[in-house]
């Protein structure tokens, strides 16, 4: 309060132009390595979009919540194809990207990519289960106190609220919106903004002979979920 009034006032910058919709396709970058990096991306939403809460929760279930997500369970836990696979929206003042990132053994890259694409398509077709939705809601609610646990956290939240022109009640509104979401709400929002056919796919790794994926393991493995960010 003592510092900000002393700062010079300048004109507000014009908002950046909205990005154009990218053309779906696949590009490989030849890179000498035992691993191949995979990135799948398409255009997402701006930060102030009304579907933000539904997409946040839907992504937590798909690949944004660490262990226990659809992607982590199928790609890492059941098949051991990667140390980690993560998805996430990066909403900005204008529409930011939705991305899925992972790396795997070079000889399993094609099969792993096909598996991830199939898992995304299945998730969009069927939506989350009731159990997945309930668990993700608990995780978001449990992480909420940590998002304002320190002065730095509070300043960060206030900075986001100001930068993205969100209401001062944003955090409370967000939690209420998340808890009110149904399976159909999440499924509808994810399908409204994502399509299995719209991914821009970039792979970075060597061109090597591909091998079939190992069969999935049925042995359960309990792992703690990471703390999500709001």
Image (tube, rainbow, N blue to C red):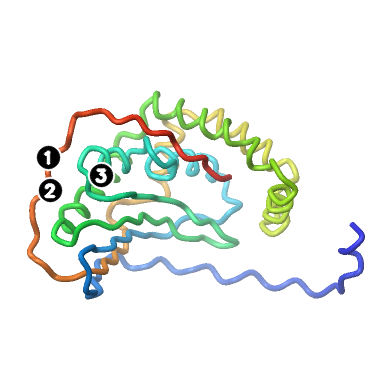
Tag 2 residue:
213
Please provide percent x and percent y for residue 1: 89, 57
Q: Residue at x 44, y 69 (%)?
A: 20
Q: Is residue 201 above or below residue 132?
A: below
Looking at the rendered structure, which numbered label has been put on residue 215? 1
Neighbourhood count class around disc 1 (C-alpha, 10 Å): few under 14, some 14–19, many 20 upward: few
Q: Are marks 1 and 2 in contact (CB under 8 Å)?
A: yes
Distance from the alpha carbon under mark 1 to that under mark 3: 11 Å
Please state if 148 lies on the left or on the right of 229 as rendered.
right
Q: Earlier in the sequence, mark 3 or mark 2?
A: 3
Find numbered disc 1 in the image and state the secondary structure of the residue it sits on: loop
Most foreground residue, 80 or 165: 80
Say which residue appears at 75% left-offset and 48% top-offset.
151
Horizontally, residue 83 falls left or right of residue 188, namely left
Circle 3 residues within 10 Å: few <14, some 14–19, many ≥20: many
Residue 95 drawn at (x, y percent): 51, 60
Name the spot of residue 9 as percent of width and height, x first: 85, 72
The local secondary structure at tag 2 comes to loop
Q: Which of the marked residues, 1 or 3, is nearer the chain's N terminus?
A: 3
Cα separation, mark 3 vs mark 2, equals 10 Å
Q: CA distance from mark 1 to mark 2?
A: 6 Å
Q: Judge by depth and name the residue closer to the eye, 29 or 185.
A: 29
Q: Which residue: 62% across, 31% down?
A: 176
Residue drawn at 27 percent across, 39 percent down: 77
x, y percent for residue 32: 21, 74
**Nearer to the camera, 67 or 166:** 67
Q: What residue is pinned by disc 3?
A: 75
The numbered mark at residue 197 is none
Q: Is residue 223 left or right of residue 16?
A: left
């Amino acid at each position: 309060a003592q510092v900000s009034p002393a700062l010079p006032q300048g004109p507000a910058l014009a908002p950046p132009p909205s990005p154009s919709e990218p053309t779906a396709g696949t590009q490989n970058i030849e890179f000498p390595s035992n691993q191949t990096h995979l990135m799948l991306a398409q255009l997402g939403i701006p930060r102030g979009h009304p579907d933000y809460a539904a997409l946040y929760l839907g992504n937590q279930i798909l690949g944004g919540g660490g262990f226990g997500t659809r992607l982590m369970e199928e790609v890492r836990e059941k098949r051991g194809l990667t140390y980690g696979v993560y998805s996430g929206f990066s909403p900005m003042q204008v529409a930011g990207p939705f991305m899925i990132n992972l790396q795997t053994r070079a000889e399993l890259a094609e099969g792993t990519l096909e598996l991830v694409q199939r898992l995304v398509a299945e998730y969009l077709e069927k939506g989350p289960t009731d159990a997945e939705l309930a668990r993700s809601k608990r995780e978001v609610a449990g992480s909420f106190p940590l998002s304002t646990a320190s002065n730095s956290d509070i300043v960060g939240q206030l900075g986001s609220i100001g930068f993205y022109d969100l209401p001062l009640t944003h955090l409370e509104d967000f939690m209420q919106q998340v808890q009110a979401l149904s399976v159909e709400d999440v499924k509808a929002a994810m399908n409204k903004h994502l399509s299995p056919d719209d991914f821009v796919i970039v792979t970075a790794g060597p061109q090597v002979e591909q091998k079939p994926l190992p069969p999935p393991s049925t042995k359960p493995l309990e792992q703690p979920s990471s703390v999500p960010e709001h």
